[in-house]
Image: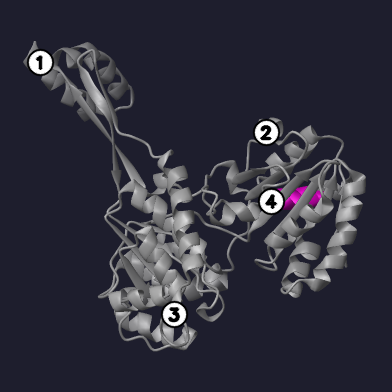
Amino acid sequence: MGLRIFTYPSDKGEKFLQKLINRAEEFPEKIEKEVKKIGKEVLKKGDRALKEFTKKFDGVLIEDFKVSEEEIEKAYEEVSEELLEAIRYGIERIRSFHEKGKPESWFEWKDGIFRGQVVRAVERAGLYIPGGKGGETPLISTVLMTAVPAKIAGVEKVVMVSPPRKEGGLHPALLVAGKEAGVDEIYKVGGPWSIFALAYGTESIPKVDVICGPGNIYVTVAKKLVSAFTGIDIIAGPSEVLIVADESADPEFVVWDLFAQAEHDPMSLPLLITTSEELAKEVKELAEKLVKEVPRKEIVESALFKKGGIFVVEDIEKAIELANLIAPEHLELMVKEPVEALGLVKNAGAVFLGSYTPEAMGDYIAGPNHVLPTMGFARFCSSLSVDKFLKKVNFLKYSEEALLKDAEKVMLLAEKENLFCHAEAVRVRVKKLK
């Protein structure tokens, strides 16, 4: 088995493309049932259920979920100055990017009508941070990408949850990242039960208005289930990268960027669309050679050879036409004129321009958020931003003169909809004024 190459258009190429376009999948019914049971237990038993699930699945007995200030102070002693500097640098970059996207309240007074929109932050936000293998591979960047926009929005209380390590605590780097990014409370609990705890509230963990952050399929299903009554960021699937490249692209750059996405998960989607048949062959040969050397060889191979592939097309316009149909999470434009090509892009979670802008830069400190739509949802969904933590409240005030001016039209529309009381609510005021 190797990296597949498809000429497009062709029957095989069209078949693979259609599979990619329709890649969004329903969650297995068995998993949904299991997660629903967990949710019912959390709703019924609160903290007791959290302790039972944490002991059963994480192998840790937690008596007090909340991380103390002493634990955070100790964490600073265990984190190097270099890492602390990188965290602070990343926070500043992410903050400077997201501050520019914060919407403002507005109002206008015109023709006797005072109207507008007040922007308000949600009161509480919950952040889910995966623990990695036994809590030893902390997703520091996810803390920054979720907490910083929440604090910019003005959220009063930002709460973070993450699965505990075997010894019962959280990785020091996660605690430091949370503190530096402005997280108000941190809890040693993870898994789908922590999502239900954030949605329902327990004796220890506060009920929140919005839950953000990636997780495994069980966590994702839990987010889906609570989304009927709690805000969530997105329903995310396996990570994706699509590279559009012409003959100017360096095959080694292309291969390592495909690998970088493939190493996340065997279900990750690494794709290349190129106008150069020669580049396609070079990438295939190099990928099949270098994959033998990577630490997560089995994972990368599975994603690359079972899920991924290469399209060879006639020109950049066709390449981006396919990219728009696929609507990838990450889109890299390794072409001679990447900024010009950007003008053709309609559907992508984030776009990386030029050969010296690997997707990995966006994962950490560049500024744009790395919580992005997958499974083709970039057709209608955006990255995590300050907006997710905000509400927009419309307001309206009519003067007497303005009411008289608009009344007949409102009453006419209401009566056409057979809503007598709507019309009468306006009519009684008109009678008073006349």
Magenta highlight range? 15-21
How far, Cα to Cα, is label 3 from label 4? 37 Å
The residue lying at 76 percent from left, 73 percent from top is 297
Q: Position of residue 98 (x, y in %)?
A: 44, 44
Does 396 appear above or below 391? above
Quadrant for the N terminus, please: bottom right
Badge 2: how crowded within 10 Å, few (<14), some, or many (20+)?
A: few
Q: Earlier in the sequence, mark 1 or mark 3?
A: 3
Element type where label 4 sits in the image: loop
Choose top left, top right, bottom left or bottom right for residue 306: bottom right
Q: Is residue 221 magenta?
A: no
Image position, residue 353 (x, y; %): 67, 41
Residue at (51% x, 66% y) in the render: 82
- Of the two numbered discs 1 and 4 on the same chain, state the one appearing first in sequence: 4
**Where residue 339 is drawn, which disc sits there?**
2
Q: Nearer the viewer, mark 3 or mark 2?
A: 2
What residue does disc 1 label?
Answer: 431
Q: Is residue 187 left or right of residue 164?
A: left
